[in-house]
Amino acid sequence: MWFTIVLLGLLPQLTLSVRCTSGCVCDIRGLAKCTGDSITDIPPLDPTTTFLLMLNNTNIKILKNRSFQPFSLLLRLMITNSTLDTIQPEAFHGASQLLSIKLSSNSLSVFPLRVFSEQSELQQLQLDGNQIASVSSQLFETTVNLTELNLSKNRISQLDADVFQHLTKLNHLYLADNQLRNLPGSLFHNLRQLKSLVLSSNQLETLESGSFDHLSNLLVLMLQKNKIRKIPPRLFWHLPSLITLTMSSNQLRYLPAESFYYLFNLTKLTLYKNPLLTLPDQLMGHMPRLQELYLYETNLSTVPWNLFANMTNLRFLNLHFNTRLTSLPKNLFCCLPKLKKLSLKNNNLRELDQELFSNLISLQILMLNENKLESLPSAIFRNTSKLELLDLNHNHLRYLPGDVFVHARALKDLFLSNNKWNCDCSILGIAEWIRENLKLISDLDKGVTCYEPYQLKNHQLQSLTYKQLRCGVFQTTFMTTSAITTGAPLTPTPATSTTSIRTSTAATGTFTTPASLLSPTPDHIYVKRTNDPVFYDTIVLDNGPEIVHNNRYNGWVYLWTVPSTGPYSGFMMALYIVLLVTGVVLIVASLYALYRLHKVVWVLGNVTMGDNLKARRVRSFKVKL
Ligand SMILES: *[C@@H]1O[C@H](CO)[C@@H](O)[C@H](O)[C@H]1NC(C)=O
Ligand SMILES: *[C@@H]1O[C@H](CO)[C@@H](O)[C@H](O)[C@H]1NC(C)=O
Ligand SMILES: *[C@@H]1O[C@H](CO)[C@@H](O)[C@H](O)[C@H]1NC(C)=O
Ligand SMILES: *[C@@H]1O[C@H](CO)[C@@H](O)[C@H](O)[C@H]1NC(C)=O
Ligand SMILES: *[C@@H]1O[C@H](CO)[C@@H](O)[C@H](O)[C@H]1NC(C)=O
Ligand SMILES: *[C@@H]1O[C@H](CO)[C@@H](O)[C@H](O)[C@H]1NC(C)=O
Ligand SMILES: *[C@@H]1O[C@H](CO)[C@@H](O)[C@H](O)[C@H]1NC(C)=O
Ligand SMILES: *[C@@H]1O[C@H](CO)[C@@H](O)[C@H](O)[C@H]1NC(C)=O
Ligand SMILES: *[C@@H]1O[C@H](CO)[C@@H](O)[C@H](O)[C@H]1NC(C)=O
């Protein structure tokens, strides 16, 4: 039983192995693989069974005239990672059926001009990883069926304008890792079928205008890792099919306006590692398919507000490591409803507008770490209900509003360590939130701790007590109308304790009352806590102004106060007296009316029991009334 299984296992190998020369492995499909230092020339294989010849890691130094003439069936030839340095002028003659020639990773430096003159069927030519310094147009004169040409990893420093002129069927051209300094403007003009053009890792400093104008089928254009200082306007305007454009790691400081217009199919754009100083107001055209944008390690200090306005499909945006980026326009992310990940880490951001993220309704990951943020507006995450990960570590956070994360209901990972928490009364709200949501904080062990005051330094936020914060008594001034939220901190900016309490927009009146409008002898409200465990459940007015009204609505406590010496107090007092007098008059009047009514009812009662005479008496009584 078991040996039949073994036999069945061996069967495919038996049928596939074919008689072969030493150093080679051949299979029934016509593939011959030869490796080893002992191989110094094309091995004497059976020409009637070899369709594909792979020679790897061999010692072949020279390809002699008509080396492949006997192999009349050979379609694909590979001589890779060998010591090949010489090709005789007629090496490939007599093998016009060849479809691909791969001579990668050898030591080839010069090619006889007419070495491929019989290769009109050739589709694939890979010459990458050699020492080629120049190529002549004659080399490709007859290889008109070529679709793929790889010249990467060579030493080419310049190319003649006509070198590729016959390659009208070329789909893929790889010129990466060479020493090209410039390119003739018409170099690619005949390559109308080109789908990918890779020019990365060269020494290119400029590109001539019109260079890519005829490449209407181009899908991929790679220009990264060059020294491009500037690009001409409209360079990419005639690439309607382009899907990927990479321009990272260059020397671009400026980009011409409207550079990326008419790239309707672009899905990926990289611009990172360029010393960009500013971007033009109109840069990005309509890009409904763009999904990834990389714009980091630049010298930008800000960006135009509409930079991303035309990219409604963007999923990933990396705008980080821009060490000079200090501010972002508030509408910058206005039109990115599908953005999932936004990285703003390692910038120099100091503050963020409360509307900044208000349209990022799909955002899941937000990196804000390693900036200089001191606080965040309480409404900043109002509309990011899908946010799962938020990194705020290594900022200068001194304070956060207690309700800042309330709307980020999907939050799972929050990083808050290494900030400059100022543990005074204003920290209460967020400290309370942290205590209630400890499992969301992913870096508690790295220290979410007070930075100041000195006596609380390194104290963990979540274990702060009311007493430690010395919140017993503090002062705040009211002008006309103020409100205190039960969830938000009482003084958002501790330094401005003499201005009004910042409050909910639901309350009436002005909250950012300029200091000049405040009454000269401001009234104080002393808000005192009664018991430690719950922070904002009770507000006791110890020594308030004369007229105080408080009310609770939706978890907010509203306080209406009027300063005792202010211009309103006289008026209010007069109003109060008028109301009081009116009240007393009304009460007296209604008592009198009740008395009269009682009398009438009594008389009517007598009428129902008595005769007509009595009734007549009542009528006369009524007249008297
Ligand atoms: C050549 O052999 C090396 C191992 O030495 C292998 O990594 C490589 O893929 C081979 N190349 C080809 C083209 O088969
Ligand atoms: C290239 O060949 C050398 C020697 O034959 C071998 O040591 C090396 O691993 C090969 N490298 C690759 C990438 O095939
Ligand atoms: C190879 O062919 C060229 C002509 O195409 C000739 O000049 C040369 O001598 C030949 N080399 C050998 C070794 O036959
Ligand atoms: C090129 O390829 C086409 C089909 O792809 C074929 O018909 C033609 O014979 C080939 N050779 C030349 C020289 O065009
Ligand atoms: C072209 O050559 C480079 C360098 O050897 C290589 O990395 C790349 O994969 C090649 N491209 C193709 C399509 O074979
Ligand atoms: C853009 O892509 C779509 C779908 O991939 C394709 O149908 C369309 O032809 C492309 N547009 C251009 C101008 O290539
Ligand atoms: C969006 O692209 C169109 C052209 O495609 C352009 O007219 C418009 O100014 C662009 N909008 C922004 C905000 O850049
Ligand atoms: C860009 O910034 C880097 C480091 O911040 C600096 O070395 C470089 O000179 C700046 N480049 C320009 C063009 O300002
Ligand atoms: C936030 O979302 C609400 C509805 O969810 C919407 O009405 C409001 O316009 C959004 N805010 C902004 C600034 O877009």
Image (cartoon, rainbow, N blue to C red):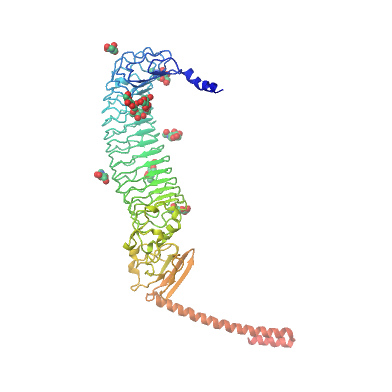
Q: Is residue 295 left or right of residue 157?
A: right
The C terminus - image quarter: bottom right
Residue 159 versus residue 191: which sits nearer the camera? 159
Q: Position of residue 280 (x, y in %)?
A: 32, 44
* Vertical side of 260 occupied by 344: above or below: below
Residue 596 image offset from top left, x and y in percent: 62, 84
**Residue 175 on image: x %, y %:** 32, 29
Instruction: Using residue 253 as the reference point, say whether residue 612 is left or right of it.
Output: right
Quarter of the render that holds ligand 3: top left
- Residue 192 in sight in this render: no
Is residue 598 left or right of 555 when viewed as pictured? right
Along the line of sight, which residue is nearer the eye, 336 or 132?
132
Label tally: 0
Q: Which percent across, then down, holds residue 290? A: 41, 40
Going 35% across and 64% down the picture, which residue do you hit?
A: 494
Nearer to me, 213 or 461: 461
Q: Residue furthest right?
A: 611
Name which residue lies at 48% across and 18% down.
14
Residue appearing at x 46%, y 80% in the figure: 577
Q: On the picture, is 56 further left or further right than 550? A: left
Residue 253 vs 135, above or below: the answer is below
- Asked whether residue 85 appears in the rendered view, the answer is yes
